[in-house]
Amino acid sequence: MVESVWDTEKSTSKQKIVKYLGKIEKAKLLDIPEKFRNLNNIIKYFSEKKYYENDNQNKIIMTFRENLENSLMAGNISGAENLFESYSKIYDAKKFIGDILLPVKTRIDLLLRKNQISNGTHTVCYNGMLKIIQGIIDSVNLKPKKDKVLVCSPYGQQSILENKLVEIQFAWKGHRVVNAPSFSSISDILFTIERDHPGIVFVTITGRNDISNAKRLIEQINEKDNIQIFSGTHSTKKTIVQRNKENLEEILIQSLSN
């Protein structure tokens, strides 16, 4: 393993040996000196050689998460996109979202709640994640064979990224997705239902403060026939069909914890 250093006397760069690794096909990530392990080209190399050793898999995931968080915090969108491309080459986009992006999103949200980052930094990070998600959505080869899905949020909830994460989950399953604009009123959403005739409506909820507005929205949508109504967070792994009006508030609260 070598690195380039500048020779001031000869005004040129030369290679300096960092470490002898032996046969490269037997080299492991832990053989790399610690200060170099997080470099994108090192991570990319071990990813592209199908580096599946179980004892090191968690270390690779944690390194990708750390690199993605650092790239987003710095507003380095191209660096974040390179990390996505490296990880998805050996795994896939679904694994990148589940293993890397969602945990990083959760941590960034936590840092904001603890006032450890500013609203501006949080917005920069969200914009970076949004660009990655939109790129994934644009790359999906859609051949819709299932019901059209409307993704929406209770009025007052800012959930563009969360709704995009729901959109990509449904798109992968073969649904054509309509994403309602942020801050759409109940009448706007009902109009969209009349216009686009979705078979499924997914109401994204991000916190308990959204429960009352979500309840009013779902009660209105429930008047429509033959529409499945789901609610939950952005994961869509566990969602609940909203047809029981008596237990609606309890069901909405439960959907937050799924």
Image: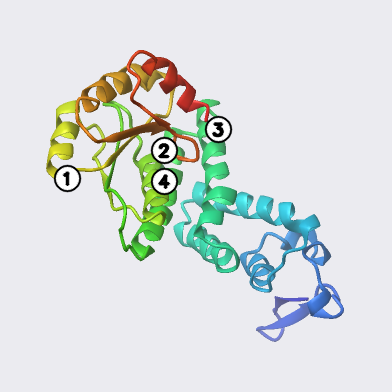
Mark 2 to mark 1 CA distance (whole Å): 36 Å
Mark 4 to mark 2 CA distance (whole Å): 22 Å
Residue at 19% x, 30% y is 224
Q: Earlier in the sequence, mark 4 or mark 2?
A: 2
Q: Earlier in the sequence, mark 3 or mark 2?
A: 3
Mark 3 surroundings within 10 Å by alpha-carbon count, few (fewer than 14), some (14 through 19), many (20 or more): some
Q: Amino acid at mark 1?
A: Asp
Mark in the foreground, 3 or 2:
3
Mark 4 surroundings within 10 Å by alpha-carbon count, few (fewer than 14), some (14 through 19), many (20 or more): many
Residue lying farthest top? 246
Mark in the foreground, 3 or 4:
4
Residue 166 in percent (x, y) is at: 39, 44
Residue 241 in percent (x, y) is at: 38, 30
Q: Earlier in the sequence, mark 1 or mark 4?
A: 4
Mark 1 to mark 4 CA distance (whole Å): 21 Å
Mark 3 to mark 4 CA distance (whole Å): 21 Å
Nearest the viewer among 107 and 56 is: 56
Q: Quadrant of residue 36?
A: bottom right
**Which mark is drawn over residue 165?**
4
Q: Quadrant of residue 141?
A: bottom left
Q: Check contact, mark 3 vs mark 4: CB within 8 A.
A: no
Q: Amino acid at mark 4?
A: Leu
Q: Which residue is mark 1?
A: 196
Residue at 55% x, 26% y is 114
Q: Which residue is mark 2?
A: 120
**Which mark is drawn over residue 111?**
3
Secondary structure, mark 2, is: helix
Q: Amino acid at mark 3?
A: Leu
Q: Earlier in the sequence, mark 2 or mark 1?
A: 2
Residue 222 in percent (x, y) is at: 25, 25
Nearest the viewer among 117 and 12 is: 117
Mark in the foreground, 2 or 1:
1
